[in-house]
Image (cartoon, rainbow, N blue to C red):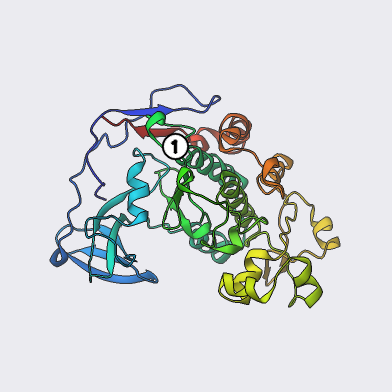
Amino acid sequence: MVSARPPRKPAATCVAKSTSTRASKKIGSRTKPKFVWKRKEWEETRELCHNVHLLRSTVTAQARVVKKVVSLEEGEPADLRHIEVRLVELLPRCNRIVQVLSYVPHYPDPGNGTIFYDYFPLGDLRAWREKEYVRRNHKQVPESNIWRFFIQVGQALAFIQNELGPSRENRACILHRDIKPKNILVMDNGSTYPSFKLHDFGCGTLLHSLKKSTSYCGTYEWQPPENPKINTRAADMWAVGACVYFMAVGGPPLKATKYPTQAELQERGITQSVFQRYGGFERCWAARGPREVVPINLSRDEQIARAILPLVYSDRGPIYMTPYSDLLNKWMCRALAERPSERPTAMTLVNEMTPQALEILKKMAGTSGLVDLELKWEERR
C-alpha cells in the first residue's frame, strides 16, 4: 500500500532491554509515493463500519485504502485538521501507530472531512479473533499472540505518552481514551505471528490541555472502574489490560448482572441526572457498572467450580479455556487493578514485563515469535 509520506531521515530504533541489539530496518526504507486523493481513481467496494468504507483503485491493481468520514465541529476553520488527524501527525512516524495517508477537509460536504488510511486485511482485534479462532477452529488465542500484543501495544502507549521516542522535549503526552479491540488493527508482518497497531485517535487529547480529570467520551465497556475520571495515563493502561482479557476470554471485564436494583444503583451513585449525563441507562451502566476480572490461569475444574461459561459449545460438548500462564495472568491483573495507582506504567511494561515475555516467547515460538518486537520511529528534522 501507499504510505503517508516518504521518510526524511533514517529511522531511529528503540529496543527493549532484553531484545536483540541487531540492526533494524529503517521505517520506510522502501519509499512509496505520497497518497493523493483523486475520486475518479477509486471505487467503494464495501462498508467496513459506519462511515468507514474500503476503496479499490481503478488504476493500480490490488491497491486498497480505507476511507473514513468524520464530522467537523461547528465553526471549525476551513484549514483546521480533524482531531484524529492532528494527534497522529503530532507524533513522529512509528511502527506501532496506524498512520494517516491523507486528509481532505470539508469533503464529501462542508460538515464533514475524510481521512484515508492503509487497509489491513486481517482487520481489527475483534474481527481477527472471531475469524481466526472462534469460527475457524473453536480454539482460544495462543498465549504467544497475547504476549506479542501486550509488548507491542505497551510500546505504543509509551510512545504516545511521550515516554519513548525522539524529540521528547518538544512533544506532549497524548491520551487515547478509546483503546478497545476495534481500535487495534492486526497486521501481517510476513511471519506466522501477526503484529498489532494502535488506531483511531478520535477521542484522544493532550494531557497538558485538560483542566479536569473527568470526560464522557469513548466506549465505556472498555474504560476503568473510576469512569468518568479517564483523563489519565492509568485509564489507558486499564484499557490495554481489558484488551488482553478480551483476547483470552472474548469479552470485556464486566460483571455479568441482571437489571440492577435501586439499591445497587444508589450504591454506585447512579441517579437520573447521571443517566442523562451518559446518554441513557445502557451507556451509563456500561460505564459505572461493576468490573470483574476472572483469572485466566484457572484449570478446567476451577472454571466449572466457579460456574464460568465455556469458550464455545461444539458437537463434542463444551470447550473450556486451556489455562494461560501465571505470569500472563499476573501482568493482565496488574493492568486491570481497581486502583489507578496500582497499575503499571507503560514504561514498566517496556522495561519489566517485556524481558520476561521475550523469554517465554522464545520458548513457545522460537525466533519467528520474536519478529517485529522492536519499536521503531522516524527522526524529525
Q: Nearer the viewer, residue 320 or 174?
A: 174
Q: Residue 266 in the image: x percent, y percent? A: 77, 70
Residue at the far right in the pictured view: 305
Is the residue 330 above or below the residue 228 in the image?
above
Residue 234, quarter of the rendered image = top right
Is the residue 240 above or below the residue 282 in the image?
above
Which part of the image, by quadrant, shows the C terminus?
Answer: top left
Q: Is 6 on the left-hand or right-hand side of 264?
A: left
Q: Residue 11 in the image: x percent, y percent? A: 32, 30
Q: Does the image show residue 330?
A: yes
Q: Amino acid at mark 1?
A: Asp
Residue plotted at (58% across, 49% down)? 240
Q: Residue 377 in the image: x percent, y percent? A: 37, 34
Q: Residues within 10 Å of mark 1 (few under 14, many from 20)?
A: many
Residue 79, quarter of the rendered image = bottom left
Residue plotted at (79% across, 52% down)? 299
Q: Nearer the viewer, residue 380 or 21?
A: 380
Is the residue 28 above or below the residue 15 in the image?
below
State the residue position of label 1: 372
